[in-house]
């Protein structure tokens, strides 16, 4: 767990270790003012009130349920889309490509928008873009219009994904890792609930589900407008003994590598676990159930790790999770253990994305733009690695080639986590502030 010296001296979320009680004026010792009465906090210091009031915190969780559901709805909707627009498999798959293209730009655009205005403006614009895109997709009369709407939806998706992750990391201080895991667990809840709802209604009712998500996106805008900005990190002059810029660049490269690899593994398991299990002789229904179990385990794992992250440092949680993920992936190459090993992979991989962001915020506190680049880079893993796994499986024709390749990638992921831990020891808050100025971010 981070020490008191590592914790921010003044955070907006009522963090343990903060001297002032939430929602009460901060004071200094009685002798400071020469009288027996407490001296009020100077007005230029940030008020000690939560960055996320209860209504805003609930709305943030709902927002992650929505982005989880919307991302997961494309697959179940494809049969109806192909019939409605007379599409081939490749054309129907463009919906997911358009979504991630929009999300990638939404992350980078969200970082730029956040530098120029309050946090609540980014959240409101992102929710409204997501609502407009979901409505347009549900009501589109042609496939080009539908793809354009998906792109707009992706822009809002990326803004919400980036914005709430960095705001929660900054707004809850030492509780950031726990709150980030809880927030991202709601993404998994949406990814499970969205397809289940569409399955119950029927694939041809996808417009109803997308428009319903659009309405919900609009309804959460008012409570999200109550989110308070995190205090801007000060950027003082460089001091003697600081780590050189090359060290901070290496740290960022290590985090980017960690995220590309682990998201590639996550999407690789989700996309190719059914193929692997069917190649081992399991039925289609068993393979589908095991894959659903992987996503459920990942969701449950994030809820379970929240209290653990209050006691262990992000470095320990991320490194331990990468090690466990590697072990379970190699166990998945054993046919009799494969369905159960993938459940273990889901539990192990669960904390990496949210806890890694908290770790990044701790070591590079002056740059939310660093998080933008890391989140954007993570999408490269989701785009690049599933086709790579398919090509390897097609060439080798060996069922075990999928978990073995994923296990090899996981070894590299573990090495990146260890590298982050070693390099981060040499990177202090001042270096983080300088990196923040270079990337143009704010805490």
Image (cartoon, rainbow, N blue to C red):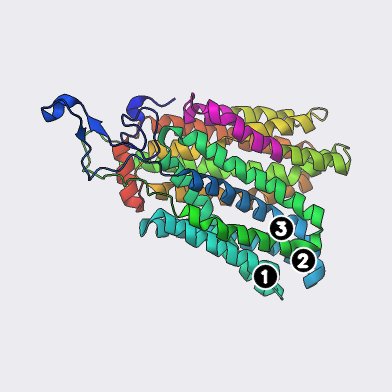
Q: Check whether the beta carbons of the residues at disc 1 and disc 3 lie within 8 A of each other.
A: no
Q: Residue at x 43, y 59 (%)?
A: 121
Mark sitting on residue 74: 3
For the residues marked 2 and 3, what is the alpha-carbon distance in whole angstroms? 9 Å
Could you tell me residue 59's position as x and y percent?
54, 49
Tell me if mark 1 has few (under 14), some (14-19) or many (20+) residues whose alpha carbon lies within 10 angstroms of its own. many
Residue 210 higher or lower than 235, as above or below: below
Tell me: 17 left or right of 165: left
Q: In this rendering, does residue 19 appear at all?
A: yes
**Displayed quadrant of residue 153:** bottom right
Mark sitting on residue 146: 1
For the residues marked 1 and 3, what is the alpha-carbon distance in whole angstroms? 12 Å
Q: Nearer the viewer, residue 166 or 29?
A: 29
Tell me if mark 3 has few (under 14), some (14-19) or many (20+) residues whose alpha carbon lies within 10 angstroms of its own. many
Asked if the stretch drawn in magenta spans residue 17, the answer is: no
Tell me if mark 2 has few (under 14), some (14-19) or many (20+) residues whose alpha carbon lies within 10 angstroms of its own. many
Q: Nearer the viewer, residue 123 or 44?
A: 44
Q: Name the secondary structure under disc 1.
A: helix
Q: Residue at x 57, y 61 (%)?
A: 130
Q: Check whether the beta carbons of the residues at disc 1 and disc 2 lie within 8 A of each other.
A: yes
Q: Which residues are magenta?
A: 295-322
Q: In this rendering, does residue 353 appear at all?
A: no
Tell me: 80 left or right of 134: right
Mark sitting on residue 344: none
Q: Which residue is mark 2?
A: 81
Q: Residue at x 51, y 28 (%)?
A: 309
């Amino acid at each position: 767990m981070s020490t008191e010296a590592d914790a921010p001296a003044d955070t907006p979320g009522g963090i343990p270790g903060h001297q002032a009680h939430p929602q009460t004026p901060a004071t200094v010792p009685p002798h400071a003012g020469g009288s027996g009465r407490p001296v009020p906090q100077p007005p230029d210091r940030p008020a000690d009130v939560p960055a996320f009031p209860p209504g805003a915190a609930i709305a943030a969780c709902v927002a992650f349920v929505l982005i989880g559901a919307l991302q997961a709805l494309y697959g179940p909707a494809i049969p109806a889309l192909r019939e409605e627009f007379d599409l081939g498999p490749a054309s129907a798959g463009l919906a997911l490509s358009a979504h991630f293209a929009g999300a990638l730009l939404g992350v980078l655009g969200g970082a730029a928008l956040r530098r120029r205005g309050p946090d609540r403006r980014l959240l409101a614009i992102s929710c409204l873009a997501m609502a407009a895109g979901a409505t347009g997709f549900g009501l589109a009369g042609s496939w080009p219009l539908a793809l354009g709407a998906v792109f707009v939806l992706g822009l809002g998706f990326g803004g919400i994904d980036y914005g709430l992750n960095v705001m929660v990391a900054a707004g809850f201080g030492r509780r950031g890792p726990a709150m980030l895991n809880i927030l991202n667990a709601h993404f998994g809840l949406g990814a499970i609930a969205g397809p289940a709802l569409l399955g119950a209604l029927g694939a041809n009712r996808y417009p109803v589900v997308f428009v319903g998500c659009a309405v919900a996106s609009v309804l959460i805008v008012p409570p999200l407008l109550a989110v308070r900005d995190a205090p801007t990190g000060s950027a003082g002059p460089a001091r003697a003994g600081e780590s050189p810029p090359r060290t901070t660049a290496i740290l960022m490269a290590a985090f980017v590598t960690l995220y590309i690899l682990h998201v590639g593994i996550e999407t690789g398991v989700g996309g190719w676990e059914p193929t692997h299990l069917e190649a081992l002789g399991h039925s289609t229904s068993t393979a589908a159930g095991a894959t659903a179990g992987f996503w459920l385990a990942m969701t449950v794992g994030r809820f379970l790790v929240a209290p653990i992250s209050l006691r262990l440092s992000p470095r320990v949680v991320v490194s331990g999770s990468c090690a466990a993920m590697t072990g379970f992936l190699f166990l998945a190459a054993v046919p009799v253990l494969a369905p159960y090993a993938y459940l273990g992979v889901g539990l192990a991989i669960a904390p990496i994305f949210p806890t890694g962001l908290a770790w990044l915020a701790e070591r590079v506190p002056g740059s939310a733009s660093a998080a933008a680049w890391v989140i954007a880079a993570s999408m490269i893993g989701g785009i690049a690695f599933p086709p790579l796994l398919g090509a390897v499986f097609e060439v080798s024709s060996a069922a075990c080639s999928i978990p073995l390749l994923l296990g090899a990638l996981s070894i590299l992921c573990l090495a990146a986590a260890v590298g982050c831990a070693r390099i981060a020891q040499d990177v202090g808050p001042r270096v983080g502030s300088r990196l923040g100025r270079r990337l143009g971010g704010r805490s």
